[in-house]
Amino acid sequence: MKQLSEELIAQLLESGYELRNIEYKSPFNWSDKKATWIKEKTIRAILATTNTRSGGQIVIGVETKDDKSINLKGVTDEELKSLEDFDGIKGEVDGFSFTNTDFDISWGSHKNKKYVVLTIHEFSEIPAICRKNGETKGVLTIYDIYARSKKAPYSSIKATDAELREMIHMAVDKEKTGLKSRGLVKKSTISPEEFYKKQVKDLIQ
């Protein structure tokens, strides 16, 4: 697992609250069955962040209070170790998505506390759609599409029209870029919304 500089960890924590492209999660042990709720919330956040323009980071080790302020708790060595199995974690995450996700896991320290950072990259072709229900009711639901909300207070939500429209344009832009890179020109005969609906229909059938 790559170690990040203390300066970078400080930058991720300096706002004191969540941003659209930065989400905080309380410390937990990925392997602990009692932590299923927070683990599934983290998986939901990964799917939401990959569906958000430019992706983002999830910092594990930061408790968000009811008033949205944060408590910098850090993770224990045991919790850090449980997040070292990248292949196993990615397998679990991708098990909840019709398409593969793209993310990295790193860690770093700040003021003698350790944090885990998930760096999630924007989807490559079409958005991630949840492919099955989670164990915790209402956290991960089959066919739901998640995104980081466009308006504050920022959170990982079931995408509304605002987020879905952004994803539609992201997907269309990616197709156009791909065609141009291959020297192809394609005049669209359908709207971005129709194109996206067709892609989703083909994916889940």
Image (cartoon, rainbow, N blue to C red):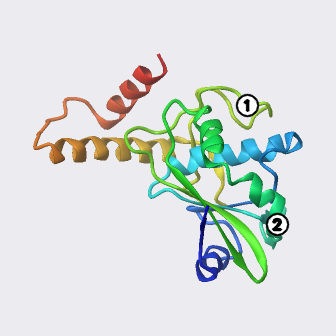
> Which residue position is annotated with label 2?
67
> Which residue position is annotated with label 1?
134
Task: Using residue 196 as the reference point, say whether residue 119 is left or right of it.
Answer: right
- Determine which quarter of the picture holds residue 57: bottom right
Front residue of this view, candidates 85 and 137: 85
Residue 184, given in percent of the width and then of the height, sits at 11, 39
Residue drawn at (62%, 73%), measured in percent from left and top?
A: 12
CA distance separating discs 2 and 1: 27 Å
Q: Which SS class for mark 2?
A: loop
Residue 20, given in percent of the width and then of the height, sits at 57, 61
Residue drawn at (36%, 34%), measured in percent from left and top?
A: 193
Q: Please, is residue 108 above or below residue 81 in the view?
A: below
Residue 136, given in percent of the width and then of the height, sits at 80, 34
Three-letter amino acid code of the residue under disc 2: Asp
Q: Please, is residue 81 above or below residue 36 in the view?
A: below
Front residue of this view, candidates 46 and 74: 74
Task: Using residue 57 as the reference point, say whether residue 166 is left or right of it.
Answer: left
